[in-house]
Image: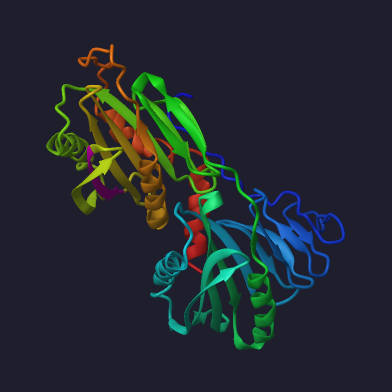
Amino acid sequence: MGGAVFLCVCLTIGTFALAGGLATPAGDDPHRADLAARAVVEDATHRFTVVAPDGWTVRTSPPSEFSLGPPTGNSNIAIRSEPWCSEGTLPQAEGMLTTVLGTYATYSGFSVFEAIQARMLNGHASAHAVITHFLAYGRAYQVLAVVLGPEWSTNWVFSGLVHDVSEIDRWSEINATWDSFTVRPGPMPGTLSHNGTHFSVSVPPGWEATPDVASGGGTADAVLVDSLTGTSVVIVSEGRSLQGTTAEARAILQEAIDGLSTRTGFAILEPVHDRVVDGHPAAEVYLTWQPSTYNLNADIIVVVGAEWQQFWALSGSSYSWFGPGSRTCLNWTAQRFDIADVPFATAIPMFLERYSLWILVTGLVATTVEGSVLGYLVARSSRRSH
């Protein structure tokens, strides 16, 4: 695969599993389906189901995976995926919802109508709250909720919106749909092994992994990507004379920071700090810059291995609104990054082809900035303005 890694974001609903049979498109619009009463609706990637309210219509509505609308009025239900990799606990669900609520705090007339409540929802950690704010039709009431799906490396954000008090009778239908949210069984984590650069790594469930990806004039050892959100983890390595110290990891990381520092919108969100990856000294930084209209956040970890005389760089990147969830996926990957033992008969001074540090820098942006994903992101930005 040459150049940037282009992502295809699935924005069509596809075929729905319905109680009582398959849906038929309504009119000439292939993106709408009239639902039978209380239809069980499955998302296009077969990750979850919900029970739709009587007579509500399924639509594509980027950035949501789908939305549901009533026969009349302006109320709606929308569900979207965000990257998230962790155990799936109630405190984590509360924390994710707190982050979501923060994105609405600037809305006109915003206030929290019902505080965050956490609970297990059909076997998965979830949290919900009710907010109120003003829209064109008057005061709106909105249930915001999250459900964590570690088996899919996903956090789903559920929004049920009543545009004004004249539609408050829709509230019970919205709540019933939220109560019905059910996560389908997910795949087991995969493993990618790269013998040439002496590591193996677990792949988050539901993600795709590709070895030896051409990027920025060099080759990334591996690219792990969530095709729904464009979030990625890029792994690169370079041969270098090393003693295996934290100071070396920090110095190498600083080279990458210096390379990015001239870019538009560059800022360090969290300063360099030490950590350990598979028993090896490492250093990490969290930063941002603006390669296009939107900010890209990147979490970079450099791991040094004196036994192989090389270092590895793991970089998790996403657009800024996916930042909190993206970081959980890089940390999940780093915790499952396994450096091979050196065979007894192998000489220590073995050097790989020396790549430019620009592989590290350009590898960060390769999977999320370019290509068809941009249209999805533009649509998402437009949606967030409502």
Please report the residue visible at 32 percent of the width from the left and 25 percent of the height from the top. Answer: 341
Q: Residue at x 48, y 51 (%)?
A: 377
Residue 257 vs residue 14: left or right? left
Nearer to the camera, 334 or 45: 334
Could you say where residue 340 lies in the image, as x and y percent from the top left? 34, 26
Looking at the picture, tell me which residue is in the foreground, 294 or 54. Answer: 54
- Prevailing secondary structure of the magenta residues: strand
User: Which x, y percent locates residue 47?
Assistant: 63, 52
Indicate the position of residue 327 as horizontal and vertical percent values.
Answer: 37, 51
Q: Answer with the quarter of the image where residue 142 lies.
A: bottom right
Q: Residue furthest right?
A: 20
Instruction: Give the residue at x 72% y 62%.
Output: 58
Query: Viewed as shown, does residue 245 lie left or right of 361?
Result: left
Q: Is residue 334 above or below residue 385?
A: above
Classify residue 211 as left or right of residue 37. Answer: left
In the rendered structure, which segment of residues is drawn in magenta? 281-289
Residue furthest out toward the front: 344
Tell me if residue 344 comes above or below residue 221 in the rendering. Answer: above
Residue 24 in the image: state x and y as whole percent: 84, 55
User: Relative to the observer, which residue lies in front, 285 or 76?
Assistant: 285
